[in-house]
Structure formats: structure tokens, C-alpha cells
Amino acid sequence: MLQQISEIEAHSRGAIPALHTEEYDGWHLRFARNHTRRANSVNVLTPGILPLSEKIGHCEASYERVEQSCHFRLTPLADPDLDDELAARGYGFFGETEVRAINLPELELPEISPDVQISDCYSETWLSGLAALTGQNMEKQAVFREMLDHIDMDIHCLGISRGSKIVACGLGVSSSTHLGLFEFATHPKYRRQGLAARIAWHLLGEAKKTGLEWAYLQVVKSNKAGIDFWGRVGFTEPLYSYHYRTKS
């Protein structure tokens, strides 16, 4: 299972990339001008060999230099004592998130809806629609667009429009084996009409046809509506979870 977790974690780091990454004794310090905690946190790949206290101090200093909060993102790959050490230093527990995965060859899918639109990832219509639906301000829009330039995999930008406006959107990023689903959002007026599900099924269907093995997504554990939605799409069980530790 740890091998599968490691593969998904590697894929997600590439799919939602940092603008700058510092590698330090098995840890990745990721920086993306505070766009999301996921792209602005310490991610543990392997425990390494240096003492925890030395490594934590190094991370705190690195984020302090760029005037960012020091977040640690803790998955099952993290050092076994790291969570307790951070708690003892006053780091709060935040953002518990489930990672759910589907084996694509075994997945049964409905027919793909004809109203799903495929966009170029640099399409102004799609980028503006995503920004409006996800609440990106101008600064976060600029960072997101810069992050797209750092993705070294296939990017799939999908949306559904009503009139001239995108009312539902989703982003898929695929390698030769994995598909990650991100940035799903629907305008409040159009929720509970199955629009986001149609986008997800389109992405999953195309990934299955091209021979990919796994699809995955990340959903905050307290987001009951999100968990229910992804369960209906087919992501019924969590594979693993992660959380953040941030200095209060």
C-alpha cells in the first residue's frame, strides 16, 4: 500500500506543482506564493537521517525568509514521530483530507454527456470561469496560471456552459498510469443537476480508454457534500488520509 501511496503522492506533486521546491533530507519544501497549502507546505517523501529538531528548524527558517506560514503536510509516508513532535511545538491540526482512488480497468461508467466542453488549458474563457467558480482573486489567478506552466503531464480542462458562461468546471492531469482530478466547482444556481458528475465521468472514461490504471482525488474529510458527491461518481472509499500541522 505504501508503494501505491508514494506513486499517488508523486503524481499529485507534479499535477499541482509548486513554483519552487527545496529538497532537504527526504523532505520537499514547496513554495507557490500561498496559492494553496498543498503547494506551500513541507511534504515528506522519506524520513531521512537528520534529527527531527534540526529539520523542523530548517523548514521554519526557510518559510520565514519568504514571509509564509510553515505548514507540514503529513501523509502515511511521514516520519513516525513527526506528528507528535510538531504537536509538542504548538503546531495545530488542520485540513484532514481523504485521498480516494479508483482502479480504472474495473470501472463501469455511464455514457459521456455531449454538453461537456474540452478547453485549452490557457483558454481565457475556461480560466476566467474557473476563477469565478472557485473564488480566485487576481493574485491567485496569476499564481495558478504560472503553476500550469510547471505541469509536465497532460492537462485536461473541462467545463459545461449555460449561455456564454461556464457554470461547472473540472481539471484532470494525467501521466501514463494515473489521472488526478482537481478544481471541481459548480455555480450554486446549477448544483444538484449532475453537471460536475458528467465532467468527472468524461475524464474517467477518456482515461480508461487510453489505458490508465488509477484515478484519484483529494477531498477534505469535513466536506460531507463533497464526499457524498464523489461517492456517487464512484470514489466510495478512502485509500489514505493526510492532514496539516501549522504553527498556531
Image (tube, rainbow, N blue to C red):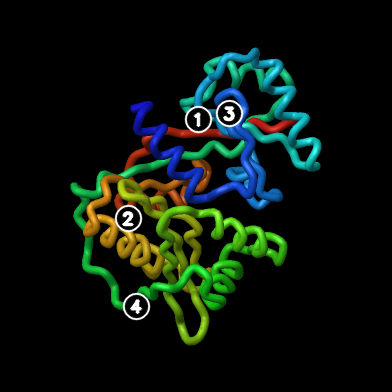
At label 4, the amino acid type is: Asp
Instruction: Work out how far the residue at label 1 is from the one at label 2, CA to CA, in angstroms.
Output: 24 Å
Residue at 70%, 16% (x, y): give it.
53
Q: Where residue 75 is drawn, which disc sits there? A: 1
At label 1, the amino acid type is: Thr
Instruction: Work out how far the residue at label 4 is from the one at label 2, CA to CA, in angstroms.
Output: 18 Å
Instruction: Work out how far the residue at label 1 is from the one at label 4, CA to CA, in angstroms.
Output: 37 Å
Label 1 Cα crowd, 10 Å radius (few <14 / some 14-19 / many 20+)? many
Question: Where residue 123 sits in the image (x, y, percent)?
Answer: 52, 75
Which tag is nearer the camera, tag 4 or tag 2?
A: 4
Sequence-wise first label, 1 or 2: 1
User: Can residue 248 be spotted in the picture?
Assistant: no
Label 4 Cα crowd, 10 Å radius (few <14 / some 14-19 / many 20+)? few
User: Can residue 47 be spotted in the picture?
Assistant: yes
Relative to 119, is 208 on the left or the right?
Answer: left
Name the residue beneath numbered marker 4: 115
Name the residue beneath numbered marker 3: 27
Instruction: Work out how far the residue at label 4 is from the one at label 3, CA to CA, in angstroms.
Output: 43 Å
At label 3, the amino acid type is: Trp
Name the residue beneath numbered marker 2: 233
Question: Where residue 12 sits in the image (x, y, percent)?
Answer: 47, 44
